[in-house]
Amino acid sequence: MAKQVDINCDMGESFGMYKLGHDEEVIKYISSANIACGFHAGDPIWMNKTVTLAQNHGVEIGAHPSYPDLAGFGRRNMDISSDELKSDILYQIGALQAFTKDKKLQHVKPHGALYNQAVVNEKIAKTICEAILEYDSNLILLALSGSKWVKTAKEMGLKAYNEIFADRALNDDGSLVSRSKEGSVLHDVNEVADRSNQMVIEGIATTISGNEIEVEADSLCIHGDTPGAVQMAMKINNNLKSAGVEIIPLQNIAS
């Protein structure tokens, strides 16, 4: 059986008159879209446009909820109560679902600081899982490969899949290198494509210190707002297919 992987991308992160990313081009090379829900980026118009874009290309749709942090693009840690966080997540999932009409969402992938905090903070991880389960227990959680968050979600009865990042450097413990550090984001197209193949096919990732660690790759995240994003997305997609990897939506990946 051929190796299978989902390719996901954060989308719909424009706001008002400000356009961010190359969604119309990158959409051609992915199988799942994480759509911003208005708390870190996006607004009703852009959410609706991005849902339509995904549906027109046969790409599955997931919610990309965040802390309420438009000014900081959702990349700042926030100290809010579990009740507030749960309500914020439910609100965002529901807002996006309103635009998909009769088609259900496939997954939820938290954004930025919320995602990173859930990796290391079990209370936050559980709150996110509780919100998803309350909204729709059939939704898939997309979380960092090998993290305790994935294990916690599964123990709570949630479908949880392991995510790896094509263009983000990893620490030796498998966590993402902070964007504040040099080398945290990779820009060389060939390097990123080769690295993606290694992670997906071999289950091995090279960390920022040069060590090799094991990773589980259900879904590969690419970014549509970095320099050369379209070229990178095309190269990653083509390289994986050339190596015999089948690119399919997250919901079709065997758990």
Image (cartoon, rainbow, N blue to C red):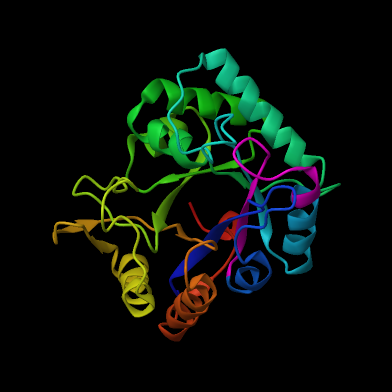
Q: Quadrant of the N terminus?
A: bottom left
Q: Quadrant of residue 108?
A: top right
Residue 111 seen from this side: yes
Front position in the image: 189 or 5? 189
The image position of residue 139, as x and y in percent, is 62, 40
- Name which residue lies at 56% across and 32% down: 69
Give the magenta-colored segment's residue range. Answer: 30-46
Residue 119, above or below 8: above
Q: Quadrant of residue 194?
A: bottom left
The image position of residue 161, as x and y in percent, is 47, 48
Q: In screen coordinates, is 2 left or right of 106?
A: left
Front position in the image: 26 or 249? 26
- Name which residue lies at 54% across and 59% down: 8
The image position of residue 14, as x and y in percent, is 66, 52
Is residue 184 highlighted in magenta? no
- Name which residue lies at 29% across and 48% down: 177
Front position in the image: 85 or 146? 85
Residue 190, above or below 166: below
The image position of residue 253, as x and y in percent, is 53, 59
Residue 133 seen from this side: no
